Image (cartoon, grey):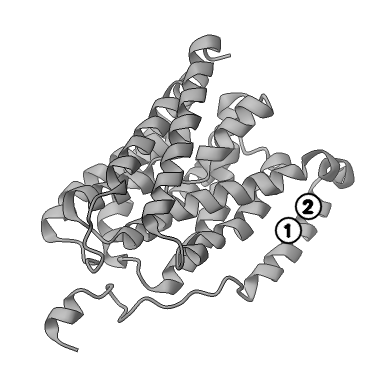
């Protein structure tokens, strides 16, 4: 292989690998979930009868999140607030906890494909940790922030995705250019701030930044965004568990179960579905979702 050809390969890999959906640890996770569920809650059967549909909510959110890097919060937060009528901060906690499982499952799939520019993590992880810390422990998430920001953020992400829909990106570019390294720190910090308040943003902001400004490979951008959001969600879940009153696992355990299995479908389906079709579908959902959420916020306020 020539030097020019090698420079276009993913860092640490020669060519993207074909991903298989099933992995040996998936059935083990299911068994572990059953053991946890029936031992952790006093009335597991009643809880199962009440909340089993949330497994499919988790699958749908994780599928969308891992095919677009925006995160399952684009589904979880509206469902928990608008359908289950939970307080906004509780909805945020459930979304973050669910994503910590779903985005991690999807990240494993993307990493197995070998298209994640892993060296970019050294420029993005510090920023997202700083931003998430500020938006969680300094400026605490509250009903006004969650409900007031989710709609606009969702709409902005949808519009950004439409902007990328017809953009011609270099599908062979995988390496982070030197001029992008310092801006990545700032952009990832902003993404961490947003994610700490509304559970979405980190992955899509980074993906959009690299695609719009540097013509970065779309699938590699999404893969990097998924890995970053997985790290971000785990970090935020730990903060909420130990410093912000805990997580309602009686609900989040169901979405988390669906997330683990739904998330694997993201990188799996991406092998055959056009990135343009994926981005167009996501953008439509995000804009409609955001408009509904914004209207609901304007009509009802923070209650």
Residue at image point 22% right, 55% down: 168
Relative height, residue 158 to residue 45 (above, below): above
Residue at image point 81% right, 45% down: 41
| Residue 92, numbered circle | none
Residue at label 1?
33
**Residue extending furthest toward the bottom:** 1
Residue at image point 70% right, 40% down: 251
Residue 133 seen anywhere in this rendered image of the structure: no
Residue at image point 85% right, 46% down: 44
Relative height, residue 212 to residue 286 (above, below): below
Q: Quadrant of residue 76?
A: top right
Relative height, residue 302 to residue 262 (above, below): above
Contact (CB < 8 A) between labels 2 and 1?
yes
Crowding at label 2, few (<14), some or many (≥20) Cα neighbours within 10 Å?
A: many
x, y (%) of residue 135? 39, 33
Residue at label 2?
37
Gap between marks 2 and 1 measured at Cα = 6 Å
x, y (%) of residue 138? 39, 29
Circle 2 SS class: helix
Crowding at label 1, few (<14), some or many (≥20) Cα neighbours within 10 Å?
A: some
The quadrant of the picture occupied by the C terminus is top right
Q: Quadrant of residue 16?
A: bottom left
x, y (%) of residue 302? 53, 15
Residue 101 seen anywhere in this rendered image of the structure: yes
Circle 1 SS class: helix
The answer to whether 303 appears left or right of 190 in the picture is: right
x, y (%) of residue 43? 88, 43
């Amino acid at each position: 292989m020539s030097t020019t050809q090698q420079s276009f390969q993913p860092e640490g890999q020669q060519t993207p690998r074909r991903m298989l959906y099933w992995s040996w640890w998936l059935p083990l996770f299911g068994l572990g979930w059953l053991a946890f569920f029936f031992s952790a809650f006093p009335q597991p059967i009643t809880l199962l009868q009440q909340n089993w549909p949330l497994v499919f909510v988790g699958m749908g959110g994780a599928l969308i999140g891992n095919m677009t890097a925006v995160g399952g919060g684009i589904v979880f937060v509206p469902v928990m607030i608008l359908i289950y009528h939970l307080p906004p901060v509780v909805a945020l906690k459930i979304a973050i906890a669910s994503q910590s499982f779903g985005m991690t499952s999807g990240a494993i799939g993307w990493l197995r494909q070998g298209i994640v520019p892993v060296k970019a993590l050294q420029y993005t992880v510090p920023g997202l940790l700083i931003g998430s810390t500020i938006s969680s422990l300094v400026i605490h998430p509250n009903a006004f922030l969650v409900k007031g920001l989710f709609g606009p953020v969702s709409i902005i992400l949808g519009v950004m995705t439409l902007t990328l829909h017809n953009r011609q990106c270099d599908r062979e570019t995988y390496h982070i250019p030197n001029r992008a390294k310092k801006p990545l720190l700032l952009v990832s910090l902003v993404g961490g701030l947003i994610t700490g308040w509304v559970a979405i943003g980190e992955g899509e902001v980074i993906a959009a930044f690299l695609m719009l400004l540097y013509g970065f490979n779309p699938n590699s951008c999404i893969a990097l965004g998924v890995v970053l959001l997985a790290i971000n969600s785990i970090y935020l879940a730990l903060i909420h568990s130990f410093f912000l009153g805990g997580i309602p696992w009686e609900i989040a355990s169901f979405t988390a179960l669906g997330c683990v299995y739904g998330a694997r479908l993201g990188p799996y389906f991406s092998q055959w579905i056009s990135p343009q079709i994926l981005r167009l579908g996501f953008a439509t959902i995000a804009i409609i979702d955001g408009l509904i959420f914004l209207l609901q916020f304007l009509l009802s306020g923070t209650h």
